[in-house]
Amino acid sequence: MITTDKTVALKTVKLPESFSRISWSLLIIGIILTLLSFAVNPKHASFGLIMTLAFVASVGIGSLFWVGIEYVSSAVWSTALRRPFEFIAGVIPFLIVIAIPLLLKMHTVFEWTRKSLLKTDPALVIKAPYLNEPFFIVRTLVVFGIWWLFYYLIIKNSKLQDTTRDPKLTARNVRLSAAFMPIFGITLTIFSIDWMMSLTPDWFSTVFGVYFFSGAVLAAMAFATLLIVKLNERNLFPVKLTADHYYNLGAFLFAFVNFWAYIGFSQFMLQWYGNLTVETAWYIPRMHGSWAVISIALVLVHFIIPFFALLTKPAKMNPHRLVFMSVWILFAHALDIYWIVMPVYDPGGATFGLSELAFLIASAGIILTVFSYKAKSNNLVPVGDPKLQRGLEFHI
Amino acid sequence: MRVLIQHIILVQNMSEIQRIPPSGRRLYGITAIFDNPDKVLSATKAATQEGYKDFDVYSPYPIHGLDNAMKLKPSRIGVVTLVLAMIGVVSILLFTWWTNSVNYPLIIGGKPYFAWPSYIPITFEMAVLFGAVSTVISLIAIWLGLPRNSHPLHDTEFMKKVSSDRFGVCVEATDPKFDEKQTMDFLQRLGGENVELAYYEVHELSLRKAVLDPKFVGAMVIVAVASSGATYFSLNKMLLMRPWSSLNNQFKVLPESRSTFYADGFAMRPPVEGTVARGHMPYIFSGNMPSAEKYMKNPLLPTPRVMEVGQRDFNTYCSPCHGYFGDGDSRLQGQFPSPPSLHSDTLRHAPDGHFYQVMTDGFQNVMPSYARQIPRDERWAIVWYIRALQRAEHAKGSDVK
């Protein structure tokens, strides 16, 4: 409530060596597994790589979204926790690296790239001005470019403030973030349409972008919560966070678990009710065979269980519960992406192989490695931010 | 709820005590004013330390950390919300299931009777409605102590101050540590200003008086009339203004209206040729008794259940004219030509198809058709029952066992 000029008492902490060792080994194992999976079954591996791209992109851009939201809304409670989000958003520049192998061999995964289909499928003819290879590549580059640009500008100001302590930098970031919000909405929609929806090119859904958004923002929050709570519990965070901070993290997890279910169900209910072939084509493989089991599991894992696990106030403040549920939600998000992507590869039934394993390990490896790398060379809290002191005194 | 009941008992007890005290007034507590949130916060901490429990802090806006300072336990109102929300969920699911698949099964949009995905939105809304309304009502009931309609601090100088720019503490007389003199000193020592005694007003002491107070009753009546009037007006008058008419004025033909689309001008179209109504079996022997007798066989077996149905239907539909045993002893007292007995030789030897045909088509313009009243299978069940009646009338020796 009352702004004070007290300087924040900072502990000097270093992330343990084991953290970066584990991250690096996960990354290397992930890369090896991905390469292996390409050698075994290039088509399966390409779908696996799409999942990796979707997961890493959703967590990365979701984190940048939370950073932006903090600036736009002038949120105070999260100032001390902003850095982990910034670090995780550091995966954004690497997205293009994951995408390049896929861009080079688009025919293996994207059905609409086959010219012969244009003759038999009138829907594809209508979509052709959007769904064509050159435009797809341009869009991907532009989307990743825009994300990288905003990431670069916002993080640069935030870092600069550590030394200059200039409050004007906050104002500049507020303006940048305000510009980023609508652009984020549009680019995230384009990304989700291009890389996930277009796998079933006949399919129409006006809410898919929002669906992907809900999962992305939730996963980003879960990843950051996991790291923040874990570090704070092990006394590795430079400032002491309280149960009130935990409560807010838990409340956001809870809110977006519900939001995901709301959007996911909206899409399902309208398409199920409308019963039009252009819409149900996407759901039919997911409602038969072993995919039906995955669909039901998704509802339980991604909604029902986290809903009750995070419902009460004490649960949202309990560090063990938060860590456990963050990992749980990240797994649920991976399952969600699996459920979006893999039925296209094999509509007959769920598969689990090298590519899926590579997806899980590589995704975790990339994000953790980037985090540990950034955490080494940067302050874990934005020491120059004028809101920091108030953020530490935050009470719900 | 427990709090509420305790409260009612308390108020009633007090109305007993009320007759005794000499001053004619009953003490509610001691109030003190503080002029900034920091002061009231430290006063609260001091009061908790001193061991006071029944006291409350008043502030025009929420003060962070006050709950901790007062050592309040976390509110359990969430339990009420959850339980009531779940009751909302279960009851609306039962309701939609019962109405749409049991009581009046109706196929909508080619979906199954229990099309649960389409009930989820209403389920969600009912969860929110039940949860929200019950939370508000229980808050009002527990916290404001319904049906009490006035608080002792209401309409006091103290309340005026703490609801605009001051902060206040009121230590209640029910506190075990309460002592008029000591508590007053204590509050003064903490820096409280205007430390005063607060009393119940007479009408606040008796629950009955409060609820029957003409002013209170009058206000309730006005609220009821005004809200129902507003509802009536908005639903019946304003909605007819049709701010959006797209759903009311659809492009459609009304019954009996003239069509500009079809050349023959009929808006109502006959069904497409060859269409058969759901559950309808075309009857090809209409008006053709010989074929009906020749080609039709009773599809049912004379099971006890079939006999039961046959008896029930015969007694309902046929017995008024044919009598309970088919003797033709009509109960219509000559208002309608009495039919002949069903036990004549011709009818006993007539094939099953004959009876079915009579029921389906009617007979000789005298006996009406029962095809609309009695479903197909039940007509065949009646045939079995008539056979049984005939057998009973002409029993053979071997039937007696």
Image (cartoon, grey):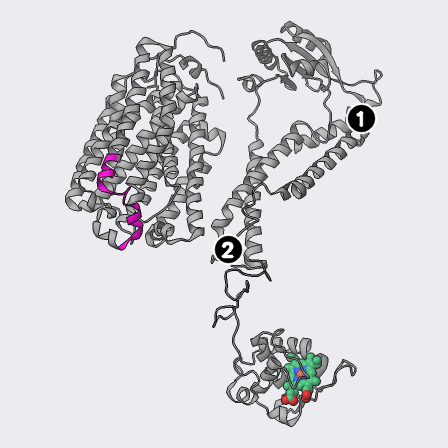
| Residue at image point 74% right, 30% down | B9
Identify which amino acid the numbered label 2 is placed on. Answer: Phe
Residue A225 visible to an observer of this rendering: yes
Determine the image quadrant of residue B243.
top right
The disc at residue B144 is none
Instruction: Report the magenta residues as a range.
Output: A120-138
Find disc 2 in the rendering and name its residue. B114
Give the x, y percent position of residue B39.
58, 9
As for residue A202 lying within the magenta part, the answer is no
| Residue at image point 43% right, 17% down | A391
The subunit letter for the residue under badge 1 reads: B
Residue B389 visible to an observer of this rendering: no
Image position of A297 (left or right of B302): left
| Residue at image point 57% right, 36% down | B81
In which quadrant will I find the N terminus of chain B? top right
Give the x, y percent position of residue B63.
56, 17
Give the x, y percent position of residue A141.
24, 32
As for residue A133 lying within the magenta part, the answer is yes
Looking at the picture, tell me which residue is in the foreground, B290 or B171: B290
In 3D space, how far apart are the residues under numbered discs 2 and 1 (Cα atoms)? 56 Å
The disc at residue B15 is 1
